[in-house]
């Protein structure tokens, strides 16, 4: 997790194009802290062979 | 005499072996001798395995003497792009990161080729982890184009294209995420076959993008591609993306001709969206005339602009590639080469919603193309913008700027065949692409065979110079960004938990506007029902 979480939060808002009202900032920052903790779980190293669940499926054309 | 053997096609050599006029050992020795003589300047192989090759050739010869050949690949040499596993050998991905990555078992495609009796000659050069461009900071140097050693051989299956064109191997495996089989085929003048997504197993192949990668062959002729594809195609239950669709006989109607077929020419991609070189356009016009002469009807079709496919491919590819390499890029970025980092680090800044939008757009683009393929039998366009560029002038940034003509078939996940369609004023090959419906691999090969047989391009091979030209490594250094932009990049990088040094941050700052521009072109007003292309299917 980045050291300066507030700066990180502001960056995320800028990327997403979202403005959070000032009176909601603290609670949203807290929620963002929880979210980053969840994301950290996804950063576990995985071998290459671990494919996503959403591997595409190409159906055959009816006219082969 | 032994040199002549190296220019037999796979089909010709197979006939010689079946008639017991040609020995697999003699054939293998001829290729090993030619590799030893010519590959010093070409650098197409990163590892030659003469002992294993000769042992396999002797075994094949003994088996054939007893019971005849199992098929057309029995006793025929082949080589692997060095992202395919071959048991007991390192799969390096041309990267310092994987020098000690010794494969415990064969990739499925490797195993199928060996089971067909083919003889493995070794591992071939690639761009690092199958992306990037010529690099001089990797454990192995970049391969050189056999038609002109100063020119780019295409990539990322560089060694595969070079080795086949130069007669160092009759067939090779490559991979194709955005054009990596067809680009080296085009620049080196070979045939290159990107199969339908899921047709060939990718198990045991280092991934670049789970949803765009394809494994496929490069060879000198269409028939040789058919022979190789026949051996490697088929369902692999251990590959989650492998299609459980029957494999037809790819040579049964190979010579049946194309009289009465309808070919859709996507001219606007190489004339209006971006203009190819005049010789390329002239070669495409000539190809259309050849198809007319063979009895096909050629009509122009209009699809989404090329940039739409590039944006979709780049956003998906960047996000997936970064996800695959994220942990190592964060902890040991120095283990990668500069070009790879340049290409992959922007993927850290692609947001989840952008990735999903690209996946949704992918399905729309693929559906549009399949609808057009209800009206025509195949699509035709150019493979590249012209002859191979000079390596000393290639910067990674250019790859973001020009939309490749090869991306649409990865986005649509359709089978595609690149073929030589002439030579430019520099004496280097030009190339066209045919594509068709999912799993209609036989139809595509039949069209390619008809075109190839009606043109003289297979008669010309490159003459390999004895001496290599001076080396001109290309700097990927980017200018220092403006302070405001540098601060934005720094904040975004911190958020993505990457820590680029000053040079890498400058490259990121240079590359990111290109990716941002592509992201901006993705449609944001799709209906709720527009599902991503990679919707999960339970089996």
Image (cartoon, rainbow, N blue to C red):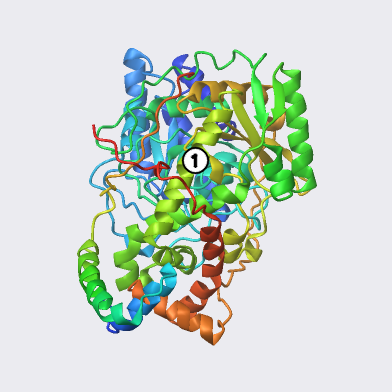
Q: Secondary structure at mark 1?
A: helix
Q: Report which quarter residue B394 is drawn in.
A: bottom right
Up/down of B18 relative to B502, above or below: above
Which residue corresponds to the image point at 20% horizontal and 71% vertical from the top-left? Answer: A34
Locate residue B162 relative to residue B198 in the image: left or right: right
Residue A21 visible here: yes
| Viewer-closest of B18 and B339 | B339
Is residue B168 left or right of B48 when viewed as pictured? Answer: right
Residue A3 position, x and y percent, is 27, 83
Q: Residue furthest bottom?
A: B483
Around disc 1, counting alpha carbons within 10 Å, would you say few (fewer than 14), some (14 to 19), or many (20 or more)? Answer: some
Indicate the quadrant containing the N terminus of chain B: top left, top right, bottom left or bottom right.
Answer: top right
Q: Quadrant of the C terminus of chain B?
A: top left
Front residue of this view, candidates B55 and B181? B181
The chain under label 1 reads B
Residue located 57% across and 49% down the image: B308
Find residue B328 and report its horizontal and vertical position in percent: 31, 66
* Residue B44 x/y as whole percent: 51, 50
What residue appears at the point 54 percent right and 60 percent down from the top-left corner? B520
Rendering coords of residue B131 (x, y %): 47, 56
Towards the viewer: B356 or B257 = B356
Reading the image, the residue beneath label 1 is: B364
Tell how many labels.
Answer: 1
- Residue B145, compared with residue A25, is above or below; it is above
Residue B499 visible in the picture: no
**Relative to A52, is B488 on the left or the right?**
right
Residue at 37 percent across and 64 percent down: it is B96
Position of B291 relative to B318 (above/below): above
């Amino acid at each position: 997790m980045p050291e300066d979480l507030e700066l990180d939060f502001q960056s995320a808002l800028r990327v997403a194009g979202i403005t959070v009202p000032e009176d909601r900032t603290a609670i949203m920052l807290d929620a963002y802290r929880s979210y980053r903790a969840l994301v950290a779980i996804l950063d576990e190293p995985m071998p290459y062979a671990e494919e996503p669940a959403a591997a595409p499926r190409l159906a055959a054309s009816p006219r082969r | 005499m032994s040199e002549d053997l190296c220019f037999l096609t796979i089909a010709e050599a197979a006939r010689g072996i079946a008639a017991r006029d040609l020995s697999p050992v003699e054939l293998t020795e001829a290729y090993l001798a030619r590799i030893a003589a010519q590959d010093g300047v070409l650098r197409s192989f990163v590892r030659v395995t003469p002992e294993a090759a000769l042992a396999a050739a002797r075994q094949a010869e003994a088996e054939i003497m007893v019971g005849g050949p199992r098929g057309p690949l029995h006793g025929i040499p082949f080589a692997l792009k060095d992202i395919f596993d071959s048991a007991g050998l390192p799969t390096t991905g041309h990267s310092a990161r994987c020098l000690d990555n010794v494969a415990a078992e064969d990739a499925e495609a490797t195993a199928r080729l060996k089971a067909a009796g083919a003889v493995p000659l070794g591992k071939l050069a690639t761009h690092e982890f199958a992306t990037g461009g010529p690099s001089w900071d990797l454990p192995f140097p970049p391969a050189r184009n056999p038609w002109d050693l100063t020119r780019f051989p295409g990539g990322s299956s560089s060694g595969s294209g070079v080795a086949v064109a130069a007669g160092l191997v009759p067939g090779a495996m490559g991979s194709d995420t955005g054009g990596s089989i067809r680009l080296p085929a085009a620049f080196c003048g070979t045939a290159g076959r990107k199969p339908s997504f899921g047709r060939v197993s990718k198990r045991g192949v280092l991934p670049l993008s789970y949803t765009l990668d394809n494994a496929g062959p490069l060879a000198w002729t269409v028939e040789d591609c058919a022979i190789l594809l026949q051996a490697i195609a088929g369902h692999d239950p251990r590959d989650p993306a492998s299609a459980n669709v029957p494999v037809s006989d790819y040579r049964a109607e190979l010579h049946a001709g194309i009289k009465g077929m309808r070919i859709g020419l996507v001219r606007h991609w190489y004339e209006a969206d971006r203009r190819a070189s005049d010789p390329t356009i002239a070669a495409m016009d000539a190809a259309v005339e050849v198809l007319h002469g063979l009895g096909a009807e050629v009509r122009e079709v209009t699809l989404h602009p090329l940039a739409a496919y590039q944006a979709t491919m780049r956003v998906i590819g960047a996000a997936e590639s970064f996800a695959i390499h994220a942990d190592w890029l964060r902890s040991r970025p120095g283990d990668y080469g500069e070009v790879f980092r340049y290409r992959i680090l922007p993927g850290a800044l692609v947001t989840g919603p952008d990735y999903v939008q690209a996946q949704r757009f992918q399905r729309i683009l693929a559906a549009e193309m399949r609808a057009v393929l209800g009206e025509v039998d195949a699509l035709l366009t150019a493979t590249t913008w012209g002859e191979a560029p000079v390596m000393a002038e290639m910067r990674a940034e250019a790859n973001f700027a020009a939309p490749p003509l090869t991306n649409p078939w990865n986005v649509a996940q359709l089978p595609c065949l690149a073929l030589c369609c002439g030579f430019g004023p520099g004496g280097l090959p030009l190339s066209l692409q045919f594509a068709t419906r999912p799993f209609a691999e036989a139809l595509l090969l039949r069209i390619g065979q008809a075109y190839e047989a009606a043109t003289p391009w297979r008669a010309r091979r490159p003459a390999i110079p004895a001496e290599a030209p001076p080396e001109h490594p290309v700097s990927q250094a980017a200018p220092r960004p403006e302070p405001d932009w540098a601060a934005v990049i720094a904040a975004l990088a911190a958020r993505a938990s990457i820590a680029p040094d000053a040079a890498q941050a400058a490259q990121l700052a240079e590359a990111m506007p290109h990716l941002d521009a592509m992201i901006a072109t993705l449609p944001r007003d799709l209906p709720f029902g527009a599902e991503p292309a990679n919707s999960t299917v339970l089996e």
